[in-house]
Amino acid sequence: LDSGFHNGNWSEIPGRTGGAGVTESKGAGNMVFLSARPHVWRGISENASLKKFNRLWRKGHLHVMPALLPGDLHSGNAFMTQGNLAPMTSKKFSNFQQYAALYPECTYCFVGDNGQGDFLAGVRMVREFGHKMDAVFIHQVQPLHLTFGWPEMEALAPDQRRKIVIFKDYIEAALGAFQRGLIAVQALSRIMHSARQDFLALEAAGSFESAEVQETERLRFNAHLEVAYQAGLSEGRPSLTATPRSANKKVQAFAGDCMVPAPPIPAPEGHPAGTIVRTPYGEGVVVSYDRIAGRYTLELNWKCRLHINHLRVRLPRTPDSSPERWGTLASTFKKAAQVLRRGSLDPKQAEDLQLENLDGGSSAGSDGDEDG
């Protein structure tokens, strides 16, 4: 399992041990970590990881206390000194082979990412243990063309490739598990709501690199919410008190086979209708604002209606409310005074220069500055 998956969403996948499932009372269960960290003296590396797992388990972030299968010094050294991922991949696959031999009655789901050797290890699991692999879930953390071992997946048979789920968020992962019969519709609903709460927490903590990245992720996340909801409707019963766009309604408790939609993540509150705003295409007036789509409808000054993302809309700037404008004015006055002292500019030209900046200069130059 990818060590970055620290929440309990994977607990929704039931144990496939002939009905034994998870032994809740002792904390034993169906989760094993395949680690690239090497086994060293007295298991120092493993013990540090197991202590972290124990804390997460006791806080409820892990549904069971997992086991850990470590890497070795050879594969770790090959990666650290040569950037060679092949030994690390082989070690993870070898650990899985040995573990699967101990529990031949079980089937398995493997979860990793496409950053290092997890993807190729998962492909080999599907190829060599196809009858025992329910699915391989790969979290996309870099472009797919950079994935180590991608050509080997393309060589798999179609039914084997269908067992590999590449996802960007837990909703995509849950949808892949639901479509393969690994979780029920109630579990799909729970994961949708859990993932939504995680996204809101990231927004509140300011965890995104920029407003543009946050908006891109928000739109993608909402699209996945809608796809998962529609997929769940094929099996579950829709709730009568919530709809996919009910952003401000409380969602009732889960009941029976009810597919309760998770409300989409809204964009920040926008400017009310009638507000004068500026865009890269000129100034206009707000007609309406859709918080779910994050999109304004504007009536531009040149009699054109525009639909535009909220990140590209600003309030007009005026000299008395713009510190940057007054900074520019101060610099201009200083330069004009220096030129006057040298006698190369007459007072009338200096006055015209000051008035030009007070008026904001030419519209083309102002727009260019703002875009920059």
Image (spheres, rainbow, N blue to C red):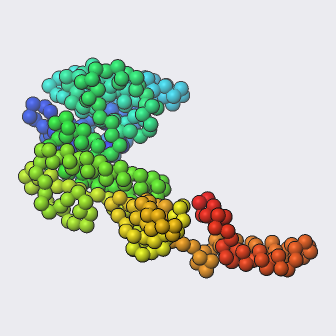
Q: For the point 47% across and 61% down, which residue is it? A: 311
Q: Is residue 355 left or right of residue 13?
A: right
- Residue situated furthest front in the rendering: 303
Q: How many marks?
A: 0
227 is higher (above) or lower (below) than 291: above
Name the one closer to the observer, 338 or 371. Answer: 371
Q: For the point 24% across and 43% down, which residue is it? A: 174
Q: Is residue 343 left or right of residue 50?
A: right
x, y percent for residue 169:
33, 45
Residue 247, picture quadrant? bottom left
x, y percent for residue 114:
40, 34
Does residue 314 appear in this view?
Answer: no
Residue 133, picture quadrant? top left
x, y percent for residue 7:
28, 48
Does residue 101 appear in this view?
Answer: yes
Q: Is residue 86 left or right of residue 252?
A: right
297 is higher (above) or lower (below) than 137: below
- Residue situated furthest right in the rendering: 343
* The C terminus sits in image quarter: bottom right
x, y percent for residue 320:
61, 80
